């Protein structure tokens, strides 16, 4: 299982804040996982195509080519605006 | 110390706590308080909601505070950030640094708030008279 | 606003006053608090006395505050300096600046305390276990 | 009359904080006034010879060659150490 989380405008666009899924067969990295999610429908395809999105794995910001492993928590979010 | 909370905080109480823990070691305390503004990009803001990523937020703030303490000689430091619904002039964030030397306290305080703005997972949503919008980075 | 006083001040009350006057205009308040340290140049400090030049002091502080307001867009600013006998960890000085933008608030606050340190007619005399001495510029 | 003021370590060295004097005949500037005060005795001569001293006339810092006029308030003091 992996835990997926979506925040702020992304959460609103996708209509979901978090979900648990089995790591899909053959998916080992972030680009693969993102493409797999984008295949769900046009909303997912467009929303996750935003090049400004950040991704955190296990609550640490990662590079776009990061590895994804069973048990991971993967989160997508727009640029942060706190402070 | 770091705190993420929905309740308001009192900068005076926080500064006094820093001072009483200090016991004469530090000569300088610098604080930054961030407030909700009633205007952004020319529009009236009636409310603001702070969303965050529980768990990651605390880790990010702890890392920022730790880095500040590695880079400068601080006798005490503090980051508090509110989440949830806020109205104009409400406190959002409080960052403070105490040091023997004022330059170090200024640099550390400014580093913590600058880094928080770009690295900590908070998102602001504004309520305007005509609806809501997510704040764009660098506009507020 | 500037104040020179023997009584203590409360940074929390001062920040809250700045905030309540602000009414949503400023997004950032930066404050500097200067405290009496219990050591200077390796010696234990038991007391400190602040002498000043009444009349000129107020003019000097007003000029510093005015210059800060000319150089940066501030919604409010404040300088408070104590005089008379003080003990370690006592408040000495409080400088605060509020602005729409945090960089301006930081620059203005740091400018005011830096300029106060070199231009305002205050002199510190320390009591050490072995006697008293006037503080040398740049040592504290 | 002119008002003379001495602060901090200077006040202690001279043993006086302020005094009022008639502007001495022939004195029109700060170097002249300082020399006139230094002629009082060795303590005054040595104390006012410190090149780090600042002088304010009418509560504004002035240059070493400033003019002194009847009615002025002239203050000598060491480098400031507030804040």
Image: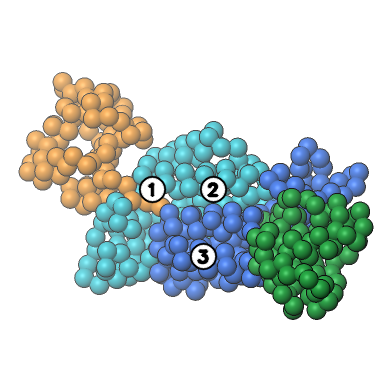
Chain colours: A green, B blue, C cyan, D orange
Real-space Cα separation, disc 1 to disc 3, in angstroms: 29 Å
> Tag 1: Cα neighbours inside 10 Å, few (<14), some, or many (≥20)?
some
> Tag 3: Cα neighbours inside 10 Å, few (<14), some, or many (≥20)?
some
Residue C5 numbered tag:
none
Q: Read off the residue under disc 2.
A: C106
On-image quarter of the N terminus of chain C: top right
| CB contact under 8 Å: marks 2 and 1 | no
Pick the front one: A12 or C140:
A12
Residue C12 vertical placement versus D26 (above, below): below
Real-space Cα separation, disc 2 to disc 1, in angstroms: 17 Å
Q: Read off the residue under disc 1.
A: C117
Callouts 2 and 1 in the same chain: yes
Pick the front one: B122 or C85:
B122
Q: Is residue B131 visible?
A: yes
| Front tag of 1 and 3 | 3
- Tally of marks: 3
Percent across and percent down for residue A68 are 71, 70
Percent across and percent down for residue C104 are 57, 43
């Amino acid at each position: 299982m992996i835990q997926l989380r979506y925040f702020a405008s992304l959460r609103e666009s996708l209509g979901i804040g978090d979900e648990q899924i089995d790591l899909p067969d053959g998916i080992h990295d972030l680009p693969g996982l993102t493409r797999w999610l984008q295949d769900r429908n046009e909303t997912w395809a467009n929303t996750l195509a935003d090049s400004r999105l950040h991704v955190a794995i296990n609550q640490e910001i990662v590079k776009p080519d990061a590895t994804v492993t069973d048990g991971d928590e993967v989160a997508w979010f727009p640029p942060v605006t706190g402070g | 110390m770091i705190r993420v909370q929905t309740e308001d905080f009192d900068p005076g109480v926080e500064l006094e706590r820093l001072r009483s823990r200090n016991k004469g070691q530090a000569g300088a305390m610098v604080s930054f308080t961030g407030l909700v503004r009633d205007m952004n990009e020319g529009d009236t803001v009636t409310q603001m909601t702070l969303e965050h990523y529980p768990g990651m937020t605390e880790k990010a703030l702890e890392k920022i505070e730790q880095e500040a303490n590695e880079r400068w000689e601080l006798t005490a430091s503090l980051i508090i950030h509110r989440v949830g619904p806020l109205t104009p002039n409400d406190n959002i964030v409080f960052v403070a640094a105490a040091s023997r030397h004022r330059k170090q306290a200024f640099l550390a305080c400014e580093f913590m708030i600058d880094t928080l703005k770009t690295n900590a997972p908070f998102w602001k949503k504004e309520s305007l008279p005509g609806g809501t919008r997510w704040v764009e980075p660098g506009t507020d």
